Image (cartoon, helix red, strand yellow):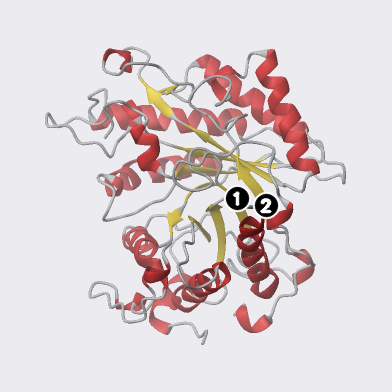
Amino acid sequence: MNKKRLVALFIFFAAINPTPASAQLYRNPMPTLFGVILNNKRPFDMPPAAELVYGLGANYHSTTSNFVTKPGYFIRYYHETETRMKVLEQLQEMADSGANTVKTFIFPVDDPVNPMLDTVEKEEAWWLAFPLSGQELDNVIRYATDVASVKAADGHYLDLEFSFGWLGCADYKRDNPNGTYGLCNMSWEEFASRAKESVSNLIYRAGFIRRPDGKKVVKVIYLEGEIMIGANPNQERFLLDIYPYLVSQANSADVTLSVYFIIASSEGEIFDDSFADKQYPAINGHRSLFWMFRSTEFMRANNLPIPGRLDFSFYPTPTNRSYADLIKRVFDDIQIVYGAHQQVGVSETFYLLDEEKRRVLGQAFANEFKLRGMPRQVIFWTTPDGGGQGINVGPPFDFDAYKPLEKPTVNPINLF
């Protein structure tokens, strides 16, 4: 997600062999979220090829390419029949087209007591209250219930993922001269309290909704996306003060709470074989993992739960090489540094408007899945900037471009 673009919408916003030393840390990591031992499997064991399911979906939070104004971003207006019917129509279309996952962003932005309209010119559709108002929370639950009810023509149901985007009054990364945070000058204690309330309410309201097949519809709730320890102000404090509490809340409700990371995108970064990191030599020659490794190391060092499946945003940007070259190299880097057994998912990537380029990108991901069972899912970004800077994307979506063309055949050499 181009967070700079989101912030700008506010007038005043400113050869594969595991490296023993690093890979061992993640074979026996600190407590994990996805890495729960089930059915006598080890935490990161891959299931047999016949059991592999390729997650495919969209970051879906707007019925149009313009999520700024109504009828775009739909959560705020989901109690209105017209909005709800449009979303249901699009969900059914996505499921019938091959999607098995939808990921929806929740943006806590405004303070219901001290609205940002005092400092900005206009209100926008995606600004939800911080914490969510009763109506907004009801809308989220109604939406999750509707996602649970959608059955594709081939009989499959949808999984739902939620992700929080902390902006405006909830922008904890914005330091103010008076020692407060965000556009509404909150103390850290006030921010943390509201953040915990926002996520806890979602956990306990949406976490128990089930599909007709008996499975929970909410697959994961991401507390934060594109974690970049060392780059994003106050993110260390955010994880230390808020993440453990919400993991505990999620565990008690049998809900998966996680975070996702970010991968270097440019060809120059990805193929920088001379890269040397004095702080973390385990990633020497693996510059693509610069921010993800720093973030997982921070979590490991502070005994924070590391997701058993490492999800991340990845917007490959080639200059002379192919999308396939960039994607293969990044997954090689991951298997070398984290271990060949590591599960990963792509939580954001391009949805290119050019049909042929979109197919080439989508098949590059799909072919890696067929080869080595990773990534376990690909969720493309939509609006804003899903097709690149300034190129917003809305339904309907072409899922065929991202589908594996054959059933996966996993090479055991790439698993352990």
Looking at the picture, tell me which residue is in the foreground, 216 or 179. 179
> At numbered mark 2, what does the secondary structure look like: helix, strand or loop?
strand
Amino acid type of the residue tagged 1 in the rendering: Ile
Q: Quadrant of residue 130?
A: top left
User: Which residue is the site of mark 2?
Assistant: 56
Looking at the picture, tell me which residue is in the foreground, 166 or 201. 166
Q: How far apart are marks 1 and 2 (CA)?
A: 6 Å
| Picture coordinates of residue 296, whole percent (x, y) | 39, 61
Amino acid type of the residue tagged 2 in the rendering: Leu
| Picture coordinates of residue 78, whole percent (x, y) | 62, 19
Q: Is residue 363 above or below residue 83?
A: below
Contact (CB < 8 A) between labels 1 and 2? yes
> At numbered mark 1, what does the secondary structure look like: helix, strand or loop?
strand
Q: In this view, does 271 lie above or below 323?
A: below
Does residue 52 appear to the left or right of 246 in the view shown? right
Residue plotted at (57% across, 33% down): 65
| Picture coordinates of residue 306, whole percent (x, y) | 45, 58
N-terminal label among 1 and 2: 2
Residue plotted at (26% across, 27% down): 12
Does residue 407 appear to the left or right of 357 in the view shown? right
User: Which residue is the site of mark 1?
Assistant: 379
